[in-house]
Image (cartoon, rainbow, N blue to C red):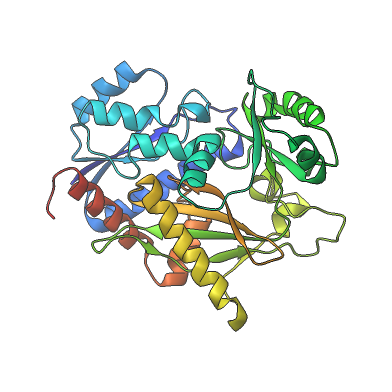
Amino acid sequence: MRVTILHNAILDESAPDEKDVLAQVAAISDALEHLGHDAVVLPCDLNLSALKQRLSHAAPNMVFNLVESLGQSGALIHLVPFFLAANHFPFTGAQADAMMLSSNKIMAKTVMRASGLPTPDWLGPYPATESPIQKPGIAQEIEAKTWIIKSVWEHASIGLDEDGLLSGVSADAVVAEMATRATDLGGACFAETFIEGREFNLSVLDGPDGPVVLPPAEIQFMGYGPEKPRIVGYRAKWDSTAYEYSHTPRRFTFAPEDRPLLKTLAEKALSAWHCFGLKGYARVDFRVDSNRAPWILEVNANPCLSPDAGFAAALAQAGIPFWAAVERILMVADRENGGPK
């Protein structure tokens, strides 16, 4: 099979989270070589006309879509799958509509709420023309909660840190903080109720018999005192010199009393998969509050496939070689595009 590995173009000045896509490219290239496929790597930018010419010339049997942004904007992540579908290039992973609905966190939360999936309350987005106070009595509710300011579109915890926490403040103060942080958050942001509790990542891999949930991972907050908020922010993911980076390991071993909770998380991860119509692979991020109630923070339709990231770790925990997961992703994509059933 001729496979084109498509990724967002990287610049010398690109941030660590953007450059990480090159580690994913290397991992997928190695897996494709192991499987005996012919692989070509193709970076792309906002010049979709040039992309069409290069893909037409390459004539791939499959495009392995690793594009996470265009023009350094995560808000354009869904353009590539729309482009590939419109030009009849078969591709891996989530389809365009699922990518758009899951990547816009406000739209994703709206879809989840309508489908009965638990997701924390939110205010925003900013900028917007409507006041966040949309019903009587909500002003008091806002002041009683702790809020965390997040990007609407950007992934990889861009702009996310403990400075974005707000407690005991008015709606106007929440909006003012969103305005202050909007630029660092990619231009559009919102406030989400902060769930103080445990954090879990559940990876899902498609296959011939449907999606399966890989072993759940919990992010531990080692050495975090009561004064330090438990947040997996940008420093925890991308700054190897930061305290947060070395004190937030993931674990896959749990006490027997966690089994009912883990079963519930797996069920809700699968529900999220079906809710958004996902394909190939995905990761669902949860917080679990003090009452052991799970809350879905994000549904990642194209989670990081780097060897040191959570998805690869979950595969290893399940005993699935990385190349075998790539084979399943290709098989599902081929089937979705009219290949063998």
Question: Could you say which is closer to the camera, residue 252 or residue 37?
Answer: 252
Residue plotted at (32% across, 39% down): 95
Q: Horizontally, is 12 left or right of 96 in the view?
A: right
Q: Horizontally, is 80 left or right of 244 in the view?
A: left
Q: Horizontally, is 252 left or right of 164 in the view?
A: left
186 up-or-down from 25: above or below: above
| Residue 278 rendering spot, x and y as whole percentages | 36, 48
| Residue 13 rendering spot, x and y as whole percentages | 60, 27
Q: Is residue 160 visible?
A: yes
Considering the image in quadrants, where does the C terminus appear? bottom left
| Residue 49 rendering spot, x and y as whole percentages | 30, 16
Task: Return the residue found at the far bottom.
Answer: 256
166 up-or-down from 308: above or below: above
Q: Quadrant of residue 252?
A: bottom right
| Residue 118 rendering spot, x and y as whole percentages | 55, 53
Residue plotted at (22% across, 38% down): 90
Question: Could you say which is closer to the camera, residue 278 or residue 128?
Answer: 128
Q: Is residue 67 visible?
A: no
Residue plotted at (55% across, 77% down): 259
Q: How many marks?
A: 0
Residue plotted at (81% across, 61% down): 224
Q: Quadrant of residue 166?
A: top right
Question: Could you say which is closer to the camera, residue 340 or residue 18?
Answer: 340
